[in-house]
Structures are given as C-alpha cells and as structure tokens.
Amino acid sequence: MGAEEYVPDKAGIQQLRKAVHDCRGCDLYKNATQAVFGEGPADAAVLVVGEVPGDQEDRQGHPFVGPAGKLLDKALVEAGIDRTQVYVTNAVKHFKYKPAERGKRRIHQKPGRTEVVACRPWLIAELDTVRPDLVVLLGATAAQSLLGTTFKVTQERGKVVELPDRAERAVATVHPSSVLRSDDREAAYRDLVADLRSAASVLS
Ligand code: URA
Ligand code: SF4
C-alpha cells in the first residue's frame, strides 16, 4: 500500500503529473475516471490543498473546477491572493464515491485515513517541487494529512503554523464545500475569507 513506489525521484511537475496515472498505491484508481493532479505555476507562492477530486474534477481531469472551486476562486480573490500565483491540489488524487441507489449519480465519499496516508507521497512531491511560501489547508482531510490526526481545524483555523519537518508555513481553514452546505452561508463564507486573509499576511 502507498504511492511511494510510484512517485519518480527528482521529477518536475509535468513528470509527476504523468506518473500519477499509473499509481496503484490504494484502491481508488479502480473506480475513478482518472487521477487529478495539482495545477498552477511550478513556482507558485501559495499551494492550496483540498480533499479529493469531486465528480466534475474526476470527469474533467482538473482540480477545483466544480462548485467548490468556483467558491474558492472567489474567496481567494477577495482575500487578496493573486489566483495566478496559486497552485491547487488535493490530499488524495482519485475520486472516491459510491453509486446512488437509483440512477447514475455518483455520491462523493470522504477518503479514509488509509487513502490519505497512501496518497501523501504525491502531495509531498508537489511541495518539494513547488516549494511555496505558504500552504493553505482546506478542511480536516488536508490539514491532518500534513499536520497529523490530532490537529483540529475548528480550534486552529486561521492561525499560522509550521509544517512538521518542513520549511513552509501553513494556515488551515474549512473546506469550501462546507461553506456551500452551511445553514448560514454568508457567515461561513466571511469566515473563510478572513482565514485566507490571515494566510495572505505570511506573504507580505
Ligand atoms: N473538492 C476538493 O477537495 N477538491 C476538488 O478538487 C474539488 C472539490
Ligand atoms: Fe495512488 Fe493516490 Fe490514486 Fe490511491 S488515490 S491510487 S495513492 S494516486
């Protein structure tokens, strides 16, 4: 188990993106359409980590192109983070879902700890290649991939923390999908933007 043996050494982003399609590090490749690797400038100042590609991302092959991505784009702009300076990726690279009981809909499932740990070598390879000044962790899955399972987004959101054994500083916040699901969307969105603003302060 684990992606380690599939990640080429000293590879650039293009090589990594090509290699991820052969990954068999966990079972998720079996039912997904394709792996969805990170995208953005190879020298981006900010690296944003989501959870796992959704239905749209799985079909299109690009991260954050669905509703959560639209909201993220808007929030980044509002927080003063130049979207062209941002590399976006996910903690887990293959879509995880279960078929709806009726019809063709595919229902998003949260990746488990095994899948997050299995896929982490890809994320580490992206970090090693991009070497951002700031890492933004969207939601518990992304945060716990890099900060450990005891990390609590609800308590630590918006704070600048050091990534263990790495030079980068990170800020965790909620996942944009949770804003879309929130009873008070406006407040949840405002809080997300506030966390992203605090993250942006690392850059200046
Ligand atoms: N949610 C994520 O975590 N990542 C995506 O790429 C899309 C939705
Ligand atoms: Fe490999 Fe990650 Fe896909 Fe699992 S989810 S097969 S570890 S790329």
Image (tube, rainbow, N blue to C red):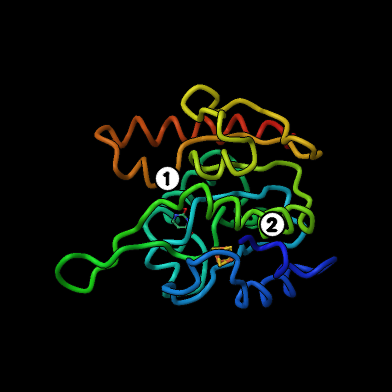
Q: Residue 70 has which mark?
A: none
Q: Is residue 83 above or below residue 98?
A: above
Q: Which residue is mark 1?
A: 176
Q: Which residue is mark 2?
A: 121
- Helix, strand or loop status at disc 2: helix
Is disc 2's CB within 8 Å of ligand 2?
yes
Give the residue type at disc 1. Pro
Mark 1, other Cα within 10 Å: few <14 / some 14–19 / many ≥20? many
- Helix, strand or loop status at disc 1: helix
Sequence-wise, the earlier of marks 2 and 1 is: 2
Identify the residue at horizontal 79%, vertical 59% (top origin): 129
Residue 37 in picture, x, y percent from top left: 60, 66
**Image side of residue 44 versus residue 143, left or right:** right
Nearest-to-viewer mark from 2 and 1: 2
Q: Looking at the image, in which quadrant does ligand 2 appear?
A: bottom right
Is disc 1's CB within 8 Å of ligand 1?
yes
Q: Is residue 169 above or below residue 103?
A: above
Q: In what quadrant of the picture does the N terminus appear?
A: bottom right
Q: CA distance from mark 2 to mark 1?
A: 24 Å
